[in-house]
Image (cartoon, rainbow, N blue to C red):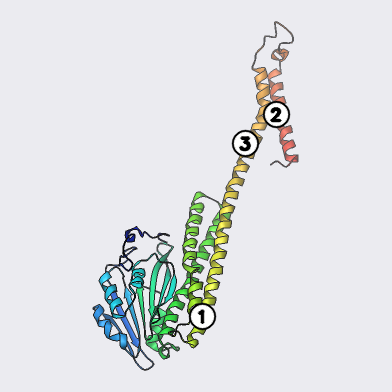
Amino acid sequence: MGRLIKKISKTAGLSPGTLVHVGEHRTDKVKITVIDYNEGSFLEKELKSVEESFPFKDSPTVTWLNIDGIQKLDVIEKIGKNYDIHPLVLEDIVNTGQRPKHEDFGKYIFVVLKMLMYDEGKNEVQSEQVSLIVGSNYVISFQEREGDVFSPVRERIRSAKGRIRKENADYLGYSLIDNIVDNYFIILEKLGEKVELIEEGLIADPTPKILKAIHGLKRELISLRKSVWPLREIIQGIEKGESTLVRASTRIYFRDVYDHTIQVIDTVETLRDMVSGMLDIYLSSVSNRMNEVMKVLTIIATIFIPLTFIAGIYGMNFNSDISPWNMPELRWRFGYIAVWGVMAAVVVWMIIFFKRKKWF
């Protein structure tokens, strides 16, 4: 799922507001798309330059400006200058190690979220930072790379389904946040399936490969928890905030997103408890297997102790011609068979004794 802690050492000592891209270079190309709409009109196009987006700032319609790729700092600077975005906000946008948060700047609301997608090929969760600027008539979204979970929103705008074309920019901002949160449920379903598979393998055969899978799953859940937990503060802050950019009719929808967030958090905590329990089960299973092995070896060793004792005595080879007390059995005709019979009888008796004690 990538690094849990981003390297931010290259920003140390710089003045506040200095733009330095922190994170992986997800794409070399910056793609800028715009969707401009109201109830009766719709426009969608890919822009060749950032300057083409400037006229949409004062448009009476709702504008969604999406930027895929944040490593081109000159593009970020131009957008920030045109839309009067604070330098510290621009610094947070290009720093992909940000904790999810929201800030109200009066003219716009700044929101940072973690968008999660499941990579079927690698069988792991991919995380990406998404920054949203929600203004009075526009929403600007910054993504690390092309590809997102906003396709349902785009389709509703294109087809004029639902109420999105009738609402303002705050509803568009809600729709984008809602899609990010709803996609968490898909991720949780995938992780839940992995938990079940690992649990089945753990019960059947707790191998080191299973232990590695448990640790990998635990790491994914830690990263997911880190992305999800701050969402409560974000959604609650927007819903109960005093910003005039968010209308009362839209706050109801944010309340619904808040409920979804709580549900996601509860599910994440449940999965974390299950994975922690699986780790305990693995250690207990390995310990029990070791105990079983040790018990079998102990029983075998215990059986051979008296046999070794008998063999040791008759291996001393005292001369019976010197004294009748010096192993007279050595001169018996069936002495060898008699010793073997005694040994066999000892083994049979010990096995019966162990069985009655239920030691195996």
Amino acid, disc 2: Ala
For marks 3 and 2, give the CA distance: 19 Å
Quadrant (top left, top right, bottom left, bottom right) of the C terminus: top right
| Residue 247, percent from left and from top | 46, 87
| Residue 84, percent from left and from top | 32, 79
| Residue 93, percent from left and from top | 35, 70
Q: Which mark is residue 297?
A: 3
* Residue bearing mark 1: 240
Residue 64 to residue 75: above or below? below
Q: Earlier in the sequence, mark 3 or mark 1?
A: 1
Of 94 and 107, nearer the camera is 107
Q: Residues within 10 Å of mark 2 (few under 14, many from 20)?
A: few
Front label number (3 vs 1): 1
Q: Residue at x 34, y 91 (%)?
A: 60
Q: Which mark is residue 344?
A: 2
Q: Earlier in the sequence, mark 3 or mark 2?
A: 3
For marks 3 and 1, give the CA distance: 68 Å
Q: Secondary structure at mark 2?
A: helix
Amino acid, disc 1: Lys
Q: Residue furthest bottom?
A: 40
Quadrant (top left, top right, bottom left, bottom right) of the N terminus: bottom left
